[in-house]
Image (cartoon, coloured by chain):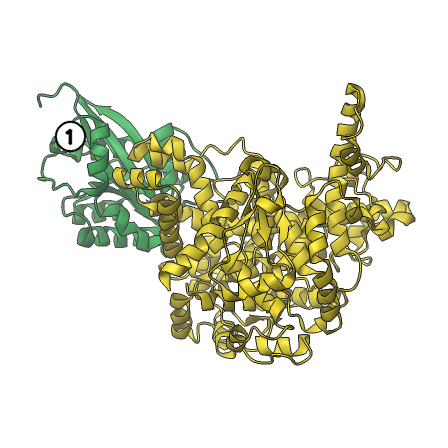
Amino acid sequence: MSFPNPVTSVKLVLLGEAAVGKSSLVLRFVSNEFQENKEPTIGAAFLTQKLTIGDRAIKYEIWDTAGQERFASLAPMYYRNAQAALVVYDVTKPASFVKARQWVKELREQASKDITIALVGNKYDLVEDDNEEDLVRKVNVEEGQNLADEEGLLFFETSAKTGYNVKDVFVAIGNKIPEATASGSDTATNQTSGEGRIDLSGGGNFNNATSGCC
Amino acid sequence: MSKKKQEMSQVYLGTSNEFVFGELGGKGKHLSSFLKNLSLTSTSRKSKNLGEDVNSSIYGNMQYGRVLGEELGNGSGGVGGGGSDELLSSPGSPKLRPKLVGRSISMGTSFAFSGSHGDDSTSINLGGGSSGSSQSGVGNNGGPYKHSNLSSSSHLKSHRTHSNTFYKDLDADWDADLNDVRNKKLTSVKQKDNNNNDPSNKSRNSLSLVDSFHPEIGMVSSLPSLPKRKDEKISSASKKQSLDHEDHRAQLEVAKQNQLNSKYSKFYKILKPGNTIDINELRKLSWNGIPQDLRALIWQLLLGYLPTNKLRQSSTLTRKRQEYNEGLRVLTIDFDDVKTTSNTSSSSLINNKDRQIYHQINIDVKRTNPSIKLYGDPQVQKSLRKILYLWAIRHPASGYVQGINDLVTPFFHIFLHNYIWQVQKKAEAMNNPLKESDYEGLFIPGILDENDEIEAQFLKDPQLIHTTLNSLDTSKISPRAWSVIEADTYWSLTRLLETITDNYIHEQPGILRLVGELRDLISKIDLELSKHFEHEGIEYIQFAFRWMNCLLMRELSLDLVVRMWDTYLSETPLGFSHFHIYVCAAFLIKFSGDLKERDFQEILLFLQKPPTASWKEKDIEMMLSEAFIWQSLYKDASAHLRS
């Protein structure tokens, strides 16, 4: 594009069962930190981070939602105008994968039809040293990949604790977001991005996202 | 909320002097009617039989207090045996009037702005005008009681005036004391009003009883030679005498110590004499902060968990603690199970839903107060799991909701502190038998047990005197004592959550309503900020949801929250719902200037981590005072608009 360094704003929402590591993923991405016992998120938390991918500057406006079922009724407020969603599960907890499936379904039905969704299996560090006899891993890579293929999702396994693949998720999402949404300075977009729904033309991804599994 | 409902909830609180277990199970039996109630009222309580039936089955068989009419009938010698409706429409009976005045406070709390000298005669009564009973009440009670908040009044140039002199807990056992207390108060209110506002008036310290106590908080050893009433003498004498600098400094030091003593002595005056504690006097005093060592006792009184009638305290607590243990005994859950993997085959005895609840509590307890060492302790975490799990399965309409794990910690913290304090004081008394009587009436019954061998060890522990919550070795506390601390925490949490149940049921209607009320309130108090938020597209739910769900506990340090709860627990009805809105407003407006300079994203980022790290108690007290004023100003106004 002709802009020297256009800022693309990406409204992004994190969804997933409680304690799968949504906030930890964001904390790793935003501050490159990790906290062992992070307080549960209540309602939703808002964070931002800028990233330069090639010649594009992308500003992520992240809504990190609370995982507990009781807060689920708040979620539409946050994903309604989102351009991207991270649906997170814990690779050691099958129930969290079931929940992830439900979130994908809900997003497909309720969110913007052009929303970019990344399926993220977190806590990869716990299964890194898995041996045959005693498997900590309860959700196979194939299961995640299959769901991603069926639904047309980006797919990664990550570890917020070690930082493994975390940035890659956000880069892949950034690459999927068409530049059409870039709109001058980031302060000017704040108000519109808060309220106005932006219709994405879709199909504007420049790079093919790579799957993060080893 | 309509005025009538407001008053009914007051009535309910007046009678809620103890917890009573029901007899039957009935989880979720009357769910639909219960939800219907919730959607209509904020407190979700009715003082009528119907309401109690519904709620007792939903809330796992707990009911509080009794039917109003019955209580009143007993309490005031048969006058006014009707229900609350009758009460409201019959302000003529002099015996009932005190009750009416009491209830009017929450609707029409009047306060007075006065000049910087605090001159009563310049005060303008701004509140209370819309309530007839309030008006007649003021006439009858001989003048409003006045608070003076040390730290805030000087900033605000205002004094707050309470007219809640008369409302009474209608405990059935009050028969003997009720009239006596009332008569005494009728004649002494005016005098009291003056006394409380005049620091040079020595008459309030004239009780020799009070002076015989000498709390040692902050002092390594007691200083028997310390002139205990010197601060009063200084303040009255300072006008006449000119003091040289050194004297002055020494006296300031003494005054500082004695200010603390004086604060204690005011509480002793209420807590120690007689068989019945005057809960209303206690509320007034506690509103401005409770000394650390008396906090557990007073919180339990304010909650209505500990009866105000001392003769009943011991038996009531024994029963409640037994009920807690019984409740746990029938559970088939292993509270030592801290595995976070959800497919534990060992717990197949309990059904899937209960296992999910336990799993959620387990993962949340691990990350409760992560910055405080005590909450990383395995025994502490186990206690919290028990309390939260029992509460969750006994309150199926809401169940466990994230954030409740925060709300349990102030109680647990204070009650655990109280246990250590009692053990320390008992150890002291063993060395000095004269001291034992000092703490009579200040110990919560049944906390200590002479037959507890582990406790006996703890009493002899040389480290005991230096033990604090930060340095506590939890293995020194016996299972019996943990159980008592847990039970008291459980019932206190139950009482608190009962006032805000609709914050945690499906779709959290309570929180949505409170957030809306906050938005409306800000538009009245700070129109500019309100417009700025609107311009930036800020939705209140985006930041205030957490403020309601966790009662600002994520925004303030635990110490400050504890101070805040002194005031919340002194409010009637308890301040966790309505008064909290005004506190949130005061909190938000503290940052008004900053916020108006910021855009959408900056506002959200700011409000997620408001700069409260350096806050002290005085900041909290300032905020509470502002909240009080706004409540007085806007509560009536909004009620008027709605009706």
Q: Mark 1: give few (<14), some (14-19) or many (20+) Cα within 10 Å.
A: many
- Figure colour of chain B: yellow
As displayed, is residue A130 above or below residue A111? above
Quarter-wise, where is residue A26 in the image? top left
Point out the image quarter for the N terminus of chain B: bottom left
Horizontal and vertical percent for residue B384? 57, 52
Q: Chain of mark 1?
A: A
B509 sits to left or right of B468: left
The residue identified by callout 1 is A182
Q: Residue at x 42, y 71 (%)?
A: B34
Q: Chain in green?
A: A
Q: Residue at x 51, y 58 (%)?
A: B128
B245 sits to left or right of A52: right
Helix, strand or loop at label 1? It is loop
Horizontal and vertical percent for residue A148? 21, 46
Disc 1 marks a residue whose amino acid type is: Ala
Residue B313 vs residue B160, the one in the foreground:
B160
Residue B79 vs residue B569, the one in the foreground:
B79
Horizontal and vertical percent for residue B51? 48, 75
As displayed, is residue B83 above or below residue B370? below
Quarter-wise, where is residue A183 in the image? top left
A136 sits to left or right of A175: right
Residue A49 vs residue B217, the one in the foreground:
B217
B16 sits to left or right of A153: right
